[in-house]
Image (cartoon, rainbow, N blue to C red):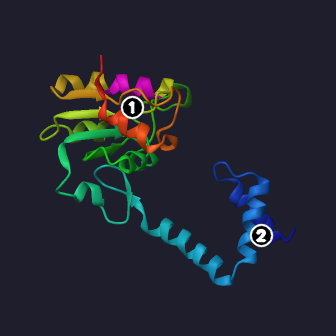
Amino acid sequence: MADALQRLVSLLQQLPSIGEKTATRLVFHVLASPPEYGLALSAAVKDVIERVRPCEICGNLSEPSPCSICSDQRRDASILCVVEKVQDLLAIEKSHEYHGLYHVLRGVLNPLDGAGPDQIRVEDLLKRLPGQVKEVIVATSSSVEGEATALYLKKRIEPMDIRVSRIASGIPVGGELEYVDRGTLGRALSGRREMS
């Protein structure tokens, strides 16, 4: 295989869930397509890298900052949904059941990997709470790390006299929010419960 082809296959293999065979198929698909497609794909990747940044308020990925969610005056600013990653925010938005604001942690507590409260956006969250926020919905995954993060957040937020709730069951144990169907995710948000 030509060096340029092999280099592209190697780069594509670094993407999640892409093995050598899939990467090779993708490269040959691009080559079999009109040249405009490959150039448009390259330009789109360049645009994302150069223009998309985390929102200065919530951490969502967006071109403008603050993002369109934080800027939307119709959203309920008294409710803040805390998620691990942007993909979780997008999954919740697709459920059409939630109309408040978000906070993206960019991870969970995981001492084995060196991820403590300083490595995720806990302090940024705590700074946002005084004022309008009346409820924080903790929507971390049901993994051990997600549960530990939820309990840590509850312990930090409760003294502020703010209600802390956890998304309801319906999400499979150990499951990731980005892979849950809309109906299940909608039910989980509607049936959220107080953390005990």
**Front residue of 158 and 111:** 158
Q: Which residues are magenta?
A: 146-153
- For the residues labelled 1 and 2, the Cα–Cα distance comes to 44 Å
On residue 117, the disc is 1
Q: Position of residue 80 (x, y in %)?
A: 25, 40
Q: Position of residue 129 (x, y in %)?
A: 20, 38
On residue 28, the disc is 2
Q: Say whether residue 7 is magenta.
A: no
- Pointer 1 with pointer 2, Cβ within 8 A: no
Question: Which secondary structure, mark 1?
Answer: loop
Q: Say which of marks 1 and 2 sits in front.
A: 2
Which residue is depicted at the point 30% across and 39% down? 81
Which residue is depicted at the point 46% across and 27% down? 142
Crowdedness near tag 1: few (<14), some (14–19) or many (≥20) residues, C-alpha within 10 Å: some
Q: Position of residue 175 (x, y in %)?
A: 52, 32
Q: Is residue 76 left or right of residue 108?
A: left
Residue furthest to the top: 196
In which quadrant of the rendered image does the N terminus lie?
A: bottom right
Q: Is residue 143 left or right of residue 76?
A: right
Residue 175 visible in rendering: yes
